[in-house]
Amino acid sequence: MDAVYSQESKLEPIGLIRASRTVVRTGTMLLAAGSGSYRVKSSMKALGRALGMSDVHAQVTINEITATCHRGPMYRTEVAQTATIGVNSDRIKLIQTYCEALEPADETTSPEEIARRLDDAEAFLDAAEAKPHLYPDWLNSLCAAIACGAFAFLNNGGPVEIGAVLIGAFLGQYSRRLMLHRHLNQLAVAMIAGAVASIVYLGLAHGMYLAGLVESIHESGYISAVLFLVPGFPLITAALDLSHLDFSAGMSRLAYALMIMISAALSVWAVSTLWGLTPIPQEKHELVPWALFAFRLLASALGVWGFAMIFNSPFIVAVVAAGVGMIANTARLVLMDAGLFTQGAAFFAGLIVGVLCNLIAPRLDIPRITLSVPAVVIMIPGAAGYRAIYYLNAGDTLQALAYGVEAVFVVIAVAVGLTFARTLTDRNWLVTGK
């Protein structure tokens, strides 16, 4: 490689400029797809070393990258920003798998080979960027409806409420997708989509109540209709980034997730206030134990599968994530029924997800995050978070604090479980600075 450095040092480092742009572009594409900063940095390092760089140092937030690429005595620092913030599990899988498969360059790697690798990397990124989403908007919205319907059952809703949630969530997610395609402000999109879903749910439920089909409109059910807006990817990746002491990425992701949740909760609060409702938790299902256990398994699997599909995961990845989430979430609910406190049950569920994903993902050659995040989103207490905002706006500080603390500590407990599992199976995660 010294020969490469000596030849290039006599000229403008055009090769380094082009290679560093490609490395930074890889990072920004992963960021825009929702990947955590740890994997963004590791993928950039892997590609950089394959292109003959001695090292790549990157500072990452939720939508910005500052990277310095070193090649012998030369280095180049570049700052980039992503145009959008979203989730695309398929793109994460494509890029991360590609980067991890690259062989690092060494003294025997010729300049021609490095140039060929650079051409291949640019062509690959062009193809990945041009690849459309795996599922059309209507199917994505249907999956969101199924996930929210599963949430409705887990939140103690009955068949009528689940049916209303399915329609409300479908229309809410479909309107959200249409607005995002037009690059509207994401906070405004969350508010409008939340309002659409909750209004449709309440309209249907109220109509059935007036017709005498149901005894109540299940006032807490309208929260399930907007749970497709829960920013599961940013919340979980923020917690994982913070556990790895990456505060710039973790805090920016956490701030983004909170803003999305607050925006959606404000619209839900406004709709419920106009309707004169309060999001009171529903009484538990009166089912025989074996039937309750079976329906919990089914609802957990459908909820995780629906969220994985929303995240644009390949179908097989969504199915595997559903299996993992089904086991972990049902175990969480059983532990809670047995008397274990909510946060403790969430920790063990996160640990189960982390261990299973760390065992399964390498064998399927897929990133862990594409399995673990959908599997734990079903455990995120979105209903408690929305209730906290409702009571805060209503002036009931004690109720707001109670629900808010519950939501925060459950998320922390799940993240701790995931992190603990990760440290057992990934040495680079255990040792900070890697």
Image (cartoon, rainbow, N blue to C red):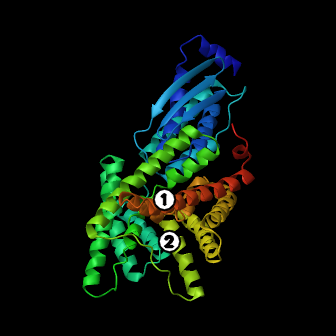
In percent of width and height, residue 208 lies at 28, 82
Q: Residue at x 68, y 31 (%)?
A: 105
Q: Residue at x 54, y 24 (%)?
A: 77
Residue 104 is labelled as none
Q: Nearer the viewer, mark 1 or mark 2?
A: 1
State which quarter of the image contains the C terminus.
top right
Along the line of sight, which residue is nearer the eye, 142 or 127?
142
Judged left or right of residue 273, residue 283 is right
Inspect this view and state whether residue 371 appears.
no
What residue did someone put label 2 on? 302
Along the line of sight, which residue is nearer the eye, 405 or 329?
405
Judged left or right of residue 352, residue 287 is left
State which quarter of the image contains the N terminus.
top right
Badge 1 local density, few (<14 within 10 Å), some, or many (20+)? some
**Mark 1 or mark 2, which has the lower sequence index?**
2
Judged left or right of residue 124, residue 333 is right
Badge 2 local density, few (<14 within 10 Å), some, or many (20+)? many
Count of number-bearing discs: 2
Judged left or right of residue 168, residue 309 is right
What residue did someone put label 1 on? 401
In percent of width and height, residue 298 lies at 53, 77
Direction top: furthest residue: 10
Whether 365 is drawn above or below 301: the answer is: above
In percent of width and height, residue 277 lies at 32, 71
Mark 2 belongs to which amino acid? Leu
Along the line of sight, which residue is nearer the eye, 309 or 118?
309
Label 1 close to label 2 by CB (< 8 Å): no
In percent of width and height, residue 319 lies at 55, 67
- For numbered disc 2, what is the local secondary structure? helix
Mark 1 belongs to which amino acid? Leu
Q: Quadrant of residue 57?
A: top right
